[in-house]
Image (cartoon, rainbow, N blue to C red):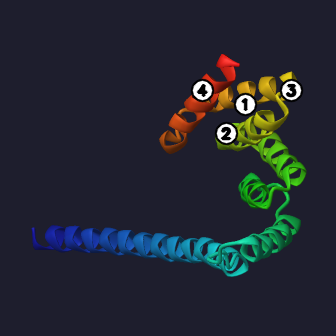
Amino acid sequence: MRATRSLWLRGCLSVAVLIGLCLSLCLVIGVVRGNAIERQYELLLSDLRTFETGESGYRQDIRALSLYIERHPDDPIFYLKRGQDYEQLHDLEHALTDFDQAVALDPSPGVAYFYRGRLYYTRWLSTRTEEDRQKATSDLSRFREYGRFSGLQGRAEEMLKNLAVQ
C-alpha cells in the first residue's frame, strides 16, 4: 500500500513538473512573441512622431509612413493613414492613390471605402460631376455594409443622403 501510494505521488509529481515545464515554455514563447510585436509597434511609433499638427506634422508623417511602406508594402493600414495625411494637405490625387492601394490590399475592413468615398464626395461638392457622385455613392455604400465603425457610420449616412438628393 505504501509503495503504491509512493508510486502514485511520484507520478503526480512528474505530471505536475511536466505541466509546469509546459506552462513555463508557453509563457516564454508568449513573452518573446509579445515582445516582438510590441517592438514592431514601438518602431512604428518612433517613426511616426505625429503629435504635431499642421502642415509640417502631416509632412513628417508622410515621410515616416513612406519609409515604413517601403519596408512593408503589403500593409494596407499605412497606405490608409498616409492617404489621410495627404487629404489633410489637400493633395487629393496622392490621397486617392493610397486609398486605392489600401482597398486593393485588403477590402474587408471597409474603412478604406469610407475615406475614399469621402474624398470622392468632397471632390463632388466642388465639381458636381456624375462620375464623382457615383464613385462616392458606391464606396460609402460598401462601407455601410461592413458596419463595424459606428463613429463613421453617421457621417457616411449623411453624405449618402446628400448624394441621393442631388
Visible residue check, residue 143: yes
- Residue position for label 1: 139
User: Dot 2, how many residues are within 10 Å of its Cα: few (below 14), some (14-19), or many (20+)?
Assistant: many
Element class at badge 2: helix
Mark before the other along the chain sequence, 4 or 1? 1
Mark before the other along the chain sequence, 4 or 2? 2
Rendered image quadrant of residue 127: top right
- Left or right: where 4 falls relative to 105: left
Q: CA distance from mark 4 to mark 3?
A: 25 Å
Q: Amino acid at mark 1?
A: Asp
Q: CA distance from mark 4 to mark 1?
A: 10 Å
Q: Amino acid at mark 4?
A: Glu
Q: CA distance from mark 2 to mark 1?
A: 6 Å
Q: Please give the name of the residue rendered at 10% of the width and 73% of the height, measured from the top-left corner.
A: 2
Element class at badge 1: helix
Q: Please give the name of the residue rendered at 65% of the width and 18% of the height, measured from the top-left corner.
A: 165
Q: Nearer the viewer, residue 73 or 28?
A: 73
Q: Please give the name of the residue rendered at 56% of the width and 29% of the height, measured from the top-left corner.
A: 157
- Is the Cβ of the residue at disc 2 closer than 8 Å to that at disc 1? yes
- Residue position for label 3: 129
- Residue position for label 2: 114
Rendered view: 16 above or below 79 = below
Rendered image quadrant of residue 143: top right
* Residue 125 x, y percent position in the rendering: 76, 35
* Residue 110 x, y percent position in the rendering: 65, 38
- Residue position for label 4: 145
Mark before the other along the chain sequence, 3 or 2? 2
